[in-house]
Image (cartoon, helix red, strand yellow):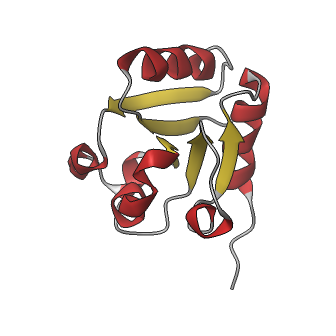
Amino acid sequence: MKRYRVAIVEPSAIVAEGVGVLLRASGDIDVIATYASPAELQRLRSQDVDVVVASLSFVRDIELLRLGGDTPVVGIQSSLADVDTLRPITAVVSIYSTASELQQSIRDVVDAPVAE
């Protein structure tokens, strides 16, 4: 079975912990690390994770979230956001999405064909 390596970036400890529990329950998603801010991601390299799951409040730090490369970012949307805010994010799930929708978004962005 393919494994998906995820880093979570979320300022709320309770939300980050809950997201981690939901992702680990999938059976094929490993949470490598959880950080409260994008700056803490500097500890990782892009080859350490397949995808970053992050609060949309950090969208202005998209280059940090992408780990300096093309790492996909799944944003967790907790409030209204305009199209320009969402544009740099690879995929977006709502705080009202189900655990399986978040899990599938991770699989989809990692397994998507690379555009040339």
Left or right of 35, for residue 112 = right
**Spot occupied by residue 107 in the image (x, y as percentages of width and height):** 71, 43
Q: Is residue 98 above or below residue 44?
A: above
Residue appearing at x 77%, y 24% in the figure: 98
Instruction: Depth check: give the residue in front, 45 or 23.
Output: 23
Q: Is residue 79 left or right of residue 62?
A: right
Furthest-bottom residue in view?
116
Q: Residue at x 23, y 50 (%)?
A: 39
Name above or below for residue 47 compared with residue 33. Answer: below
Among the 4 quarters of the image, the one containing residue 47 = bottom left
Q: Residue 74 at what x, y percent from top left?
A: 59, 48
Side (left or right) of 45 relative to 103: left
Q: Do we see residue 1 in this rendering?
A: no
Please tell me which residue lies in front, 45 or 58.
58
Residue 43: image location, x then y, percent: 21, 46
Q: Is residue 23 visible?
A: yes
Q: Position of residue 60 (x, y in %)?
A: 40, 62
**Residue at figure coordinates x 76%, y 37% from the top left:** 104
**Which quarter of the figure has residue 113?**
bottom right
Q: Quadrant of the C terminus?
A: bottom right
Which residue is found at the position 54% from the left and 22% from the top?
Answer: 19
